């Protein structure tokens, strides 16, 4: 992924630097500008890598100054570049997606896929502040079980139940939005567009909102 433009001063009809388009999977182009009026962008392609450019697609931004384009699966070109029909401050970002492994390693067989049916265990994990133990809260089948793991990786007995504190500290809330193109996350550093992947991530699960979690599996190892 990368960007030919990032809030650059763009002159009408002057194309961006070429961006490599061959040898990758699905491609998405994000366009934005701050001119306050519609801008037409043109995608140009160089099929053979011999500096012979042709118009591929024209995209018009909306009132918010943003538009995106998902390239078809059969798109084939060596290079891509973009130009605008008027002077503006613009960004053009290309996101490339790879292909999934066809034969996953057996060592990952305990990890559940997001689209697999059946119940699963989720575990919230954090270091304890008052000792060197690892606090673990297991959530499975509507029940919760708290435990602490010591330095020797053995369960520690006789510890206070910190379920309430764990749930408060590690609450997984909805901290994102979703549109047709991306997952949108906003924090104190800015707004970011991330790949959507499965739609199941867009709904809460027994332990909260899964986009706020690292991973989970069917055997209770997280």
Image (cartoon, rainbow, N blue to C red):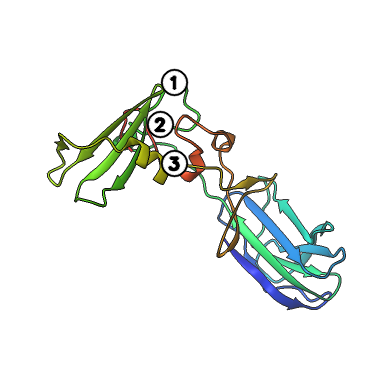
Residue displayed at 49% across by 39% down: 210
Q: Does the CB distance between marks 2 and 1 fall below 8 Å? A: yes
Q: Mark 2 or 1 closer to N-term?
A: 2
Could you tell me which secondary element the residue under label 2 belongs to?
loop
Q: Residues within 10 Å of mark 2 (few under 14, many from 20)?
A: some
Q: Nearer the viewer, residue 204 or 87?
A: 204
Q: Is residue 25 left or right of residue 117?
A: right
Residue 218, image x and y in percent? Answer: 36, 28
Q: Is residue 148 left or right of residue 222?
A: left
Q: Can see residue 101?
A: yes
Q: Is residue 215 left or right of residue 210?
A: left
Q: Which residue is mark 3?
A: 101
User: Marks 2 and 1, how far apart in space?
Assistant: 10 Å
In this view, the mark in front (2 or 3): 2
Residue 138, image x and y in percent? Answer: 33, 32
User: Marks 3 and 1, how far apart in space?
Assistant: 23 Å
Residue 93, image x and y in percent? Answer: 65, 63
Q: Nearer the viewer, residue 176 or 199?
A: 176
Q: Nearer the viewer, residue 146 or 92?
A: 146
Residue displayed at 40% across by 26% down: 120
Circle number at residue 118: 1
User: Marks 2 and 3, how far apart in space?
Assistant: 15 Å
Quadrant where the C terminus is found in the figure: top left
Q: Which residue is mark 2?
A: 112
Q: Residues within 10 Å of mark 3 (few under 14, many from 20)?
A: few
């Amino acid at each position: 992924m990368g960007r030919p433009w990032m809030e650059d001063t763009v002159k009408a009809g002057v194309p961006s630097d070429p961006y490599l388009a061959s040898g990758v999977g699905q491609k998405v182009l994000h366009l934005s500008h701050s001119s306050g009026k519609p801008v037409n962008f043109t995608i140009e392609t160089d099929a053979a890598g011999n500096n012979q450019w042709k118009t591929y697609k024209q995209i018009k931004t909306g009132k918010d100054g943003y538009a995106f384009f998902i390239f078809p699966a059969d798109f084939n070109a060596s290079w891509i570049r973009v130009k605008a029909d008027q002077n503006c401050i613009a960004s053009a970002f290309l996101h490339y997606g790879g292909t999934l492994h066809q034969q996953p390693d057996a060592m990952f067989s305990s990890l559940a896929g997001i689209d697999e049916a059946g119940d699963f265990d989720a575990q919230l994990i954090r270091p304890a502040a008052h000792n060197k133990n690892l606090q673990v809260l297991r959530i499975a089948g509507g029940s919760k079980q708290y435990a602490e793991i010591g330095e020797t990786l053995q369960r520690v007995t006789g510890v206070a139940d910190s379920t309430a504190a764990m749930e408060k500290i590690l609450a997984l809330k909805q901290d994102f939005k979703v549109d047709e193109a991306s997952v949108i996350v906003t924090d104190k550093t800015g707004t970011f567009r991330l790949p959507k992947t499965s739609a199941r991530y867009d709904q809460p699960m027994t332990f909260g909102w899964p986009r706020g979690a690292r991973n989970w599996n069917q055997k209770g190892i997280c």
